[in-house]
Amino acid sequence: MMDVTMSEFRFEHASAVAAGRMIVRVDNRGNVEHQLQLLRLPDDLPTTLDAQLRSSTRRPVTTMRLMPMSPAGHHTAFAVDLSPGRYGFVCFLPGSDGQRHALKGMNSELRVQ
């Protein structure tokens, strides 16, 4: 089991977990809607996820799970099978200023061992 907390504008979670079937519990403690997209990152990605999102040259990634928009105070859970490697959590929703939450810092990486 892994807990992921969403708020403005970040994800909080363990930095590393064991490979295998995982129940992910997601809690939106923010004041606005957020969305969690779980990405499988290339193992040889030479930069951080944040740098990749800000780059003009992006590498393809695989979406493992896309959670629907989550209103403030909403809780949900999902199961996913994770193999060893790099993963990322991203919220691509736009803020009231039009900038995506991911570019405001709402992206993070997870290592699966």
Image (cartoon, rainbow, N blue to C red):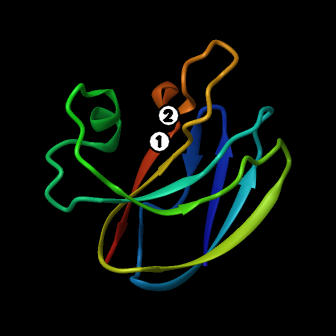
Q: Which mark is residue 92?
A: none
Which residue position is annotated with label 2? 102
Instruction: Indicate the position of residue 98 as horizontal and vertical percent values.
Output: 60, 16
Q: Check contact, mark 1 vs mark 2: CB within 8 A.
A: yes
Residue located 65% across and 22% down the image: 95
Q: Quadrant of residue 48?
A: top left
Judge whether 102 appears above or below 48 on screen: above
- Which is more toward the observer, 21 or 12? 21
Is label 2 in a helix, a strand or a loop? helix
Residue located 47% across and 42% down the image: 107
Outermost residue toward the top? 97
Instruction: Indicate the position of residue 60 as horizontal and vertical percent values.
Output: 27, 50
Which residue position is annotated with label 1? 107
Residue located 77% across and 45% down the image: 29
Q: The residue under label 2 is which amino acid type?
A: Ala
Quarter holding the C terminus is bottom left
Q: The residue under label 1 is which amino acid type?
A: Asn
Q: Quadrant of residue 3?
A: bottom right
Instruction: Indicate the position of residue 65 as horizontal and vertical percent values.
Output: 54, 64
Instruction: Indicate the position of residue 32 as horizontal and vertical percent values.
Output: 78, 32
Outermost residue toward the right? 73
User: In the displayed structure, does residue 90 sit left or right of residue 60?
Assistant: right
Quarter holding the N terminus is bottom right
Judge whether 100 appears above or below 15 on screen: above
User: In the displayed structure, does residue 48 sit left or right of residue 17?
Assistant: left
Report crowding for label 2: few under 14, some 14 to 19, many 20 or more residues within 10 A (C-alpha). many
